[in-house]
Image: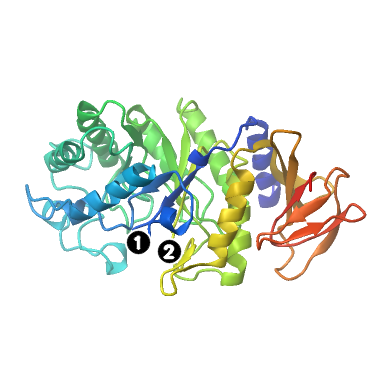
C-alpha cells in the first residue's frame, strides 16, 4: 500500500473513532514567558506549559539543596490571576546532577549535561533517583497543592539533543515524579514524555511504543505527544498512530494532549504569509482527532506560533487569525471531522453546528498554492463565508473560491 493510501486510511479510521463533541476553551493551550501575558494582549487560552520559560529543573535547582523559585512564581501567579491551569515539564538535569555534566545538549544553546539522566539512575532504571526526588519534593512543597495541575515528564525524549538516556530510566523517573507529587497533591495529573514523531518530523510513534512496552503507562494519566508537521493535515496520521500504540498497551481510555506544536521547522520557519492559513488548518485537523488539548508554541516566537510582535507590541496576522477562528470554534460541535472530499482528494472540509440552527463548514485545498484558488460547489444552506482576515463575503450560485487558507462558510447572515 502506498504512503498516500496509508495516510487516507489512517484518517478514515481515526475519523470513525472520533465522536461529535462541543469544542471547549479548555482545548486551547499555549506557551508564553513574555510580557504582556497573552490574556492581556487579547489572546484567549486555557492552559500554560512551562517549556522555554527558563524554569527547567536546572534553572531552579542550581546546586544541591539550592533553589531559585523567582521566575516560576511570577509565571504561576499569571496563571492564577488570569485563570489558566499550569503544565510544568520536569526536565533538564542540572549539570551537578548529570551523568555527563560537560556534554553538549540542544546544540549547545543550553547548559551542558541537561539532556542526560541523573547520576543516581542506572541504565536499567535502578538506583536511588534521589536528586530528582529531592527536586520534586521541594517543588511540591513550594507551590502547594492545586497550583500546578499537570506534571509532564521530560521533553521530546526521542531526540538525542533532548534525551541521552534509556527508556527504562525515564520510566523510573516517571514513577518517582508521580509518587512524590501525588503525596502532596493527589489531584495532580502526570503526562507521559511527549514524542514528536520518530525523526522529529516522522508520523510514526515508535518511541511511545517502547515507553509503554517498558511499563510507562502504569504511571501516567495523560498521553502526550508533539505536533510539528510539514503539512497541517499530517497531524491526523500521527494521532492515529498514537491511538494505535495506546490500544496495543491498554491505554485507550486516557486523554491525549499535544503539549507542543506549530509548523515545522524551528530553524527555517515557513514564510509569514503562509502562517495564518497553516495554523488554522493545523487546529482544524487536531480538532478532528481525539486530542483534548493543544499547546501552541509560542505566543511571541517569531519562528513558531508567532501571534505577537514583541518589537512593535502589536498582534501579528497569525494572532488576529487565531482570535477569529478561536471565536468561530469555541462552543461549536464538530458534526463532521475534517477529511478530503471523495470527489476531489485535494479539497478538505469539516462541518460544525451551534445553537439556534447555526451551521458552518471550513473548506480549503491542500494542494493549491497561496494566492491561487479553485472553484468548488458547496451545499445550498451556506449563504456567506468569512476569511481569516476578518472579511465577510456572500456566496453566489453555490460556488466559492477555495485555496490554501480555509474559509468559514455559514448558513446565517
In the image, taking residue 270 as reference, residue 328 lies left or right, namely right
Q: How many labels, in total?
A: 2
Query: Is residue 60 visible in this depiction of the protein?
Result: yes
Tag 1 secondary structure: loop
Vertically, is 60 above or below 249? below
**Label at residue 34:** 1
Q: How is the image coloured?
A: rainbow
Residue at 61%, 54% (x, y): give it: 324
Residue at 31%, 63% (x, y): give it: 106
Residue extending farthest right: 397
Whether the residues at callouts 1 and 2 have beta carbons within 8 Å, the answer is: yes
Residue 312 on image: x %, y %: 44, 74
Query: Is residue 234 visible in this depiction of the protein?
Result: no
Compare residues 191 and 77 and report the one nearer the observer: 77
Compare residues 84 and 128 and report the one nearer the observer: 84
In the image, taking residue 133 as reference, residue 54 lies left or right, namely right
Quadrant position of residue 317: bottom right
- Location of the N terminus by quadrant is top right
Residue under numbered circle 2? 300
Amino acid at each position: 500500500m502506498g504512503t498516500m493510501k496509508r495516510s487516507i486510511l489512517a484518517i478514515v479510521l481515526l475519523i470513525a473513532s472520533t465522536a461529535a463533541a462541543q469544542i471547549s476553551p479548555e482545548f486551547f493551550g499555549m506557551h508564553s514567558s513574555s510580557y504582556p501575558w497573552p490574556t492581556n494582549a487579547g489572546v484567549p487560552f486555557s492552559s500554560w506549559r512551562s517549556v522555554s520559560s527558563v524554569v527547567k529543573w536546572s534553572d531552579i535547582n542550581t546546586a544541591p539543596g539550592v533553589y531559585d523559585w523567582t521566575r516560576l512564581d511570577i509565571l504561576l501567579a499569571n496563571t492564577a490571576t488570569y485563570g489558566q491551569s499550569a503544565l510544568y515539564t520536569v526536565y533538564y538535569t542540572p549539570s551537578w546532577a548529570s551523568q555527563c555534566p560537560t556534554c553538549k545538549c540542544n546544540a549547545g544553546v543550553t547548559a551542558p549535561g541537561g539532556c542526560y539522566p541523573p547520576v543516581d539512575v542506572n541504565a536499567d532504571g535502578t538506583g536511588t533517583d534521589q536528586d530528582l526526588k529531592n527536586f520534586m519534593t521541594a517543588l511540591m512543597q513550594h507551590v502547594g497543592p492545586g497550583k500546578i495541575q499537570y506534571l509532564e515528564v521530560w521533553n521530546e525524549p526521542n531526540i538525542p539533543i533532548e534525551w541521552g538516556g534509556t527508556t527504562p530510566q525515564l520510566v523510573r523517573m516517571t514513577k518517582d515524579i508521580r509518587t512524590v507529587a501525588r503525596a502532596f497533591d493527589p489531584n495532580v495529573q502526570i503526562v507521559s514524555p511527549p514524542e514528536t514523531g520518530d525523526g522529529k518530523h516522522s508520523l510514526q510513534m515508535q518511541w511511545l511504543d517502547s515507553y509503554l512496552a517498558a511499563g510507562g503507562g502504569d504511571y501516567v494519566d495523560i498521553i502526550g505527544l508533539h505536533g510539528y508537521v510539514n503539512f497541517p493535515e499530517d497531524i491526523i496520521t500521527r494521532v492515529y498512530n498514537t491511538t494505535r500504540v495506546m490500544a496495543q498497551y491498554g491505554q485507550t481510555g486516557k486523554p491525549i494532549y499535544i503539549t507542543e506544536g506549530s509548523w515545522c521547522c524551528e530553524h527555517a520557519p515557513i514564510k509569514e504569509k503562509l502562517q495564518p492559513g497553516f495554523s488554522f488548518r493545523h487546529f482544524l485537523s487536531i480538532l478532528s482527532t481525539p486530542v483534548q488539548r493543544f499547546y501552541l508554541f509560542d505566543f511571541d516566537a517569531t519562528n513558531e506560533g508567532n501571534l505577537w510582535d514583541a518589537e512593535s507590541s502589536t498582534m501579528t496576522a497569525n494572532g488576529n487569525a487565531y482570535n477569529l477562528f478561536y471565536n468561530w470554534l469555541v462552543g461549536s460541535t464538530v458534526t463532521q471531522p475534517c477529511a478530503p472530499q471523495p470527489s476531489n482528494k485535494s479539497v478538505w472540509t469539516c462541518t460544525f453546528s451551534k445553537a439556534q440552527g447555526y451551521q458552518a463548514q471550513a473548506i480549503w485545498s491542500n494542494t493549491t498554492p497561496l494566492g491561487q484558488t479553485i472553484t468548488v460547489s458547496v451545499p445550498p444552506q451556506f449563504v456567506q463565508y468569512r476569511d481569516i482576515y476578518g472579511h465577510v463575503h456572500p456566496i453566489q450560485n453555490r460556488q466559492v473560491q477555495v485555496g490554501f487558507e480555509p474559509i468559514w462558510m455559514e448558513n446565517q447572515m
